[in-house]
């Protein structure tokens, strides 16, 4: 295996591992918040819900960002860890906060009577919605990391597009798993499924972004 393929596969594996822990922790935080405070229909639950989103972004961005940097430093030796990890955490926090807004908005709407049939979309419909969300939110993460690549890599604008495509697929897997969970699903299974979706999403994101990285040559 040559150096290029070794770099690519190491990148894919490390991004997958980072997202495994990041998404699993985020699922644990969300479930704990719902169990302790319920739906965010009043100020206090809203604040805790938003705090959970920030914490999820910090954890996911911190773990994944550091693992990314461990791979990137071999190709971009001038890329500082704090610069990359900080950019990754910032992008993740923004994405998690934006993703939390719809739940807060819909939580405040009146509930229909229990006699009224409620349409629960199938998992594949939620997965398609997740892909659209990933296509919209992925560039945010790419944008913050875009600045970390300043004076480090050429063609860094490609990174924004790479994250849009990568996270469109990544969020498809995450929402597919989320749509497969029922209210009575055991907690351990829910978190395990979240971790599995995270590592699958991470592998996909790593595969897409890794090929774009190979086009971004290091600057002298």
Image (tube, rainbow, N blue to C red):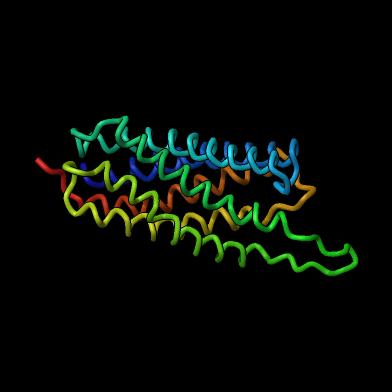
In this view, the residue in front, 20 or 28, is 28
Q: Residue furthest left?
A: 220
Q: Residue furthest front?
A: 43
Which quadrant of the rendered structure holds the C terminus?
top left
- Find residue 19 and report its horizontal and vertical position in percent: 48, 42
Residue at the spot 72% in from the left edge and 55% down from the top edge: 108
Residue at the spot 56% in from the left edge and 45% down from the top edge: 196
Residue 80, quarter of the rendered image: top left
Residue 113, quarter of the rendered image: bottom right
- Find residue 75 and report its horizontal and vertical position in percent: 21, 39
- Find residue 167 and report its horizontal and vertical position in percent: 44, 55
**Residue 55 placement, left or right of 32:** left
In this view, the residue in front, 36 or 1, is 36
- Find residue 180 and report its horizontal and vertical position in percent: 68, 56
**Residue 66 placement, left or right of 194:** left
Image position of 29 with respect to 121: above or below: above
In this view, the residue in front, 94 or 129, is 94
**Residue 110 placement, left or right of 181:** right
Which quadrant of the rendered structure holds the N terminus?
top left
**Residue 173 placement, left or right of 29:** left
Residue at the spot 18% in from the left edge and 33% down from the top edge: 78
Q: How many marks?
A: 0
Residue at the spot 72% in from the left edge and 45% down from the top edge: 42
In this view, the residue in front, 185 or 65, is 65
């Amino acid at each position: 295996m040559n150096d290029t393929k070794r770099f690519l596969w190491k990148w894919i594996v490390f991004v997958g591992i980072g997202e495994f822990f990041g998404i699993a922790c985020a699922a644990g935080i969300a479930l704990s918040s719902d169990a302790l405070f319920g739906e965010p229909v009043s100020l206090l639950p809203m604040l805790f819900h938003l705090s959970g989103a920030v914490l999820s972004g910090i954890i996911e961005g911190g773990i994944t960002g550091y693992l990314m940097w461990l791979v990137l430093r071999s190709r971009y030796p001038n890329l500082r860890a704090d610069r990359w990890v900080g950019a990754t955490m910032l992008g993740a926090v923004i994405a998690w906060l934006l993703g939390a807004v719809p739940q807060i908005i819909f939580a405040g709407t009146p509930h229909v009577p229990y006699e009224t049939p409620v349409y629960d979309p199938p998992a594949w419909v939620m997965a398609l919605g997740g892909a659209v969300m990933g296509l919209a939110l992925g560039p945010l993460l790419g944008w913050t990391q875009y600045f970390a690549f300043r004076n480090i890599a050429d063609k860094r604008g490609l990174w924004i597009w790479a994250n849009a495509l990568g996270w469109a697929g990544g969020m498809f897997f995450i929402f597919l798993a989320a749509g497969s969970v029922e209210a009575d699903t055991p907690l351990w299974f829910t978190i395990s499924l979240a971790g599995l979706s995270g590592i699958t999403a991470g592998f996909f994101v790593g595969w897409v972004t890794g090929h774009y990285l190979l086009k971004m040559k290091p600057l002298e």
